[in-house]
Image (cartoon, rainbow, N blue to C red):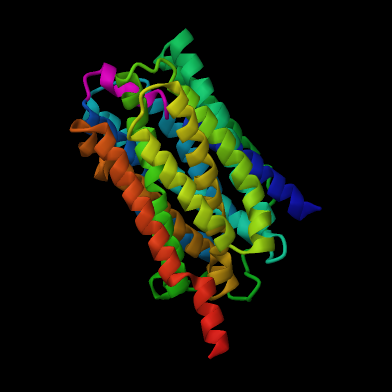
Amino acid sequence: MAKYRDVVLVLLITFLYHTMNQMFVPTLPLYITELGGSEAVVGGIVGLLSLGAIIAKVFFGKMATRHSNLLVLRIGLVLATVVLVLYQPFFGFAFLAAVRVLQSVGLAGFVTGAQGMLSENTNPSNRGLLFGFFAAMIGLGMVVGPMLGSFLVEHFNYSLLFWGATVVVALAMVFSFLIRPKSSVSALGMGRTYQPHSPWKNRNLLVVSGTMLLAASIMGATSSIFTLHAKAVGITNPSLFFGLFALTYTFSGGISGYLSHRFGNSAMIIPGFGLSILGLLLLTILNGVPVMVAAAVLIGIGFGFVNTVLMAMVPGYSINAVDASNDLAFFSNAFDSGIVLGSIGLSWLASYSFGLFWLAVAMANALGLLLYLRYNPEKMQKVKAQE
C-alpha cells in the first residue's frame, strides 16, 4: 500500500505543478506584449523555461540515479516556490529572462524527480497504465491552469496571478514532504557510487527521444504564439483553445498507456502524429472559433497519444533499471528541446506570417513521424529476433 500511496502523492504533485506552470500559458505572452515586447521577445522569454531546464536535467538525472528521485523532486519544488516570488517586480526583459532561467532549474528538478519516482514504482505490467494516469494529471493541470491564470488576470491583475501561482506550487512542495524516503541503495545493489550509462550510447532511447523532440515543438509553438495569432484574427477568448487542448490531451493521455500495452505502441503513435499534423494545418487557416476548436481537439488527442506512449517506452529501453531516472531526464530534455524549437527556434516566422509558422511546426511533426517509422525500436527488435 505504501507504494501506491507514493504514486498517488506524485500524481497529485504533478497536477499542482502543471496547474501552476499552465497559469502562465495564456497570460505571460500578453504580459510581455503589454510591456512592449515583440513576438520574438515573447518566444524567447517563454522558451527560456525549457532551454534552461535542458542543462539542469543533465545534473539532476545523475543526482537522482546516485542519490534519490525524492531528493531531486523536493529540490525542484522548493526552488520553484521561491523563484516565483521574483515575478512581482519588473526590472526589464533581461531580469524577466533571468527569472525564467532560474525557474527552469526548478522545472528540471520537478520533472526528473516526478518521472523517476513514477518509474521506480512501476513494472512492465502496469507501466503503461500508470504513465497514462501521469499524463492525465498533466492534462488536468493544463485544463485548470489556463482558466485560473486568465481569471486572475481578467478580474484582478498580474500581481495576483504571480501570487496565486506561488501558492499552488507551494502546496505541491508540502505534499512532497509527505512521501517517505526509500533506501538509497538501488535494486541492483549499486548504491550511491553507481555511474549511469550514457544515454547517447542507447540507440533505442535516441530514437524515442528524437521523435519526442520534434513532436514537442507543438507545445513551444502554442504556448508562445497561439494567443497572439488568435488576438490578431479577432478571437477574444484564446484560453478556450488551451482548455480544449488540455481536456482532449487528458482523455487521450489517460487511455493511451493502456491501449498501447494492448495493441502496441505504433497503434497510438502513428495516428497521434496524423491528428496533430492535421490540427496544425488547420491553424494555418485560423479565422475564427470553429477552426480553433477543431484544431485544439485534433492536436490535443494526437499529442496525448504521442507524448504518453513515448514516455512510457523509456524505462523499458534502459540498459539497467537504475538508469531509468537518468534516461527519463534525457528524454525530458528532448521534450524541452522541442519546446525551444517551437518557440525560440521558429517564433521569428510568426513576424512574417502566422500561417508559415504553423506550417513549419507541422513539418517538424512530419519529420518526427518519419523518424519513428524508419527507426521504430519495436520493429527493429522484431527484425533482430527473426535473424
Segment tinted magenta in the rendering: 23-37
Q: Residue at x 49, y 32 (%)?
A: 294
Q: Which residue is drawn at 52% across and 35% down?
A: 297
Q: Is residue 14 visible in this depiction of the protein?
A: no
Would residue 30 be counted in the magenta stretch? yes
Q: Which residue is drawn at 62% across and 52% down?
A: 256
Q: In which quarter of the image is residue 33?
A: top left
Relative to 133, 105 lies left or right: left
Relative to 62, 285 lies left or right: left
Relative to 179, is 380 above or below? below
Q: Quadrant of residue 244?
A: top right
The number of discs equals: 0
Relative to 261, 111 lies left or right: left
**Residue 332, percent across and down?**
45, 54
Relative to 79, is 3 above or below? below
Q: Which residue lies furthest to the top in this view?
A: 155
In this orientation, which residue lies closer to the viewer: 205 or 51? 205
Q: Which residue is drawn at 33% across and 21% down?
A: 30
Would residue 217 be counted in the magenta stretch? no
Relative to 312, is 277 above or below? above
**Residue 302, percent across and down?**
51, 46
**Residue 141, percent across and down?**
57, 34
Q: Residue furthest left?
A: 352
Q: In which quarter of the image is residue 246?
A: top right
**Residue 7, percent across and down?**
69, 49
In this orientation, which residue lies closer to the viewer: 90 or 355? 355
Relative to 133, 25 lies left or right: left
In this orientation, which residue lies closer to the viewer: 3 or 363? 363
